[in-house]
Image (cartoon, grey):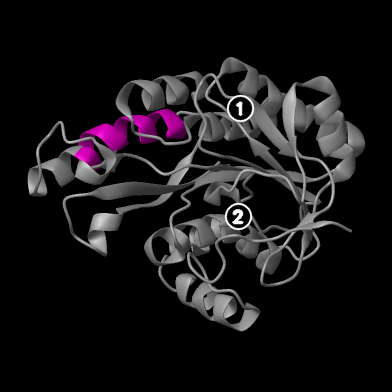
Amino acid sequence: MNVRKSIFSGSWYPDNASACEKEIQGFLKEYATETLSERTFTGGIVPHAGWFFSGSIACNVIHCLQDENPPDVFVIFGMHLHSGSPAYIMTDGAWETPFGAIQIEKQLAGELAEKFAFEIETADRFTQDNTIELQLPFIKYFFEDAKIVPIGAPPTKKSLEIGKAVVDMSIRMGLQVKVIGSTDLTHYGPNYGFTSQGTGPSAVNWVRNKNDRSVIDAMLAMDPEKVIKEGLAHQNACCSGAAATAIAAAKQLGAQQGETLTYATSYDKSPGSSFVGYVGIVF
């Protein structure tokens, strides 16, 4: 079996199982998710910065997806793409994690690749991208036997069709599926060439309470078209296509509303003139 090597282990997150487990157990103590975990969720939105900054948010969202019917497959939408980008998919092999390789769901991925125009990635030929890889140790830890379909979703209406088709195909194949959209929010400050509100506390408040708030509200309302519009117009979702496609898929699975697990920024842990927003949402 061809295995895609992890790129960010040892830097953005630990490169061995014991260190990953230690961090995960610490993450689970950071948020009170008991009432959330009593309900059944179809998927969520996760951030993808290094684990120091946003790992606890992603970890707790994925942990909340546990229920009495373990999923056969996680479909993970991600990648930093623009409206002119192709969609990407990996259809065979596996992806390395510190807890062991996580296999691709070949039948579902293959049928998607037949229906839609994808750039096919392989274990040896792929775009280095943190958005999906950062979630895989969490999935492997909480859902040892689950397989994945990793998809790069550009911010287009065609991506929303892919999200809906994922669910329809999974149901027809008898697969239990969960869906994840990986995106960070506003990248603000001189490091990102975005300083419209100056610097200091007022800029942080604007990002938290206005710019990020508007795209979070669209996510909670489960309005995928608006999520894409927000991301393109206001730079408040670096992977708006991924988030929107996950929402389209979650709605197809029957989800009717989103709920915020938590919101944070990198400024909270490392104050500076440049910072990034993160949200964890379950559907």
Q: Viewer-nearest of labels 2 and 1?
A: 2
Point 56% across, 19% down: residue? 156
Side of 115 where 283 appears, left or right: left
x%, y% of residue 184? 41, 44
Secondary structure at numbered mark 1: helix
Q: Is residue 171 left or right of residue 8?
A: right
The residue that mark 1 highlights is 248
**Secondary structure mostly taken by the magenta-highlighted segment of the chain:** helix
| Chain-order first, disc 2 or disc 1 | 2
- Let me know if residue 192 is in the magenta part: no
Q: Quadrant of the N terminus?
A: bottom right
Q: Quadrant of residue 245?
A: top right
Mark yes or no: residue 153 visible: yes
Residue 254 seen in the figure: no
The magenta segment: 207-220
> Image height check: is 87 above or below 18?
above
> Residue beneath label 2, please?
133
Q: Position of residue 259 (x, y in %)?
A: 46, 43
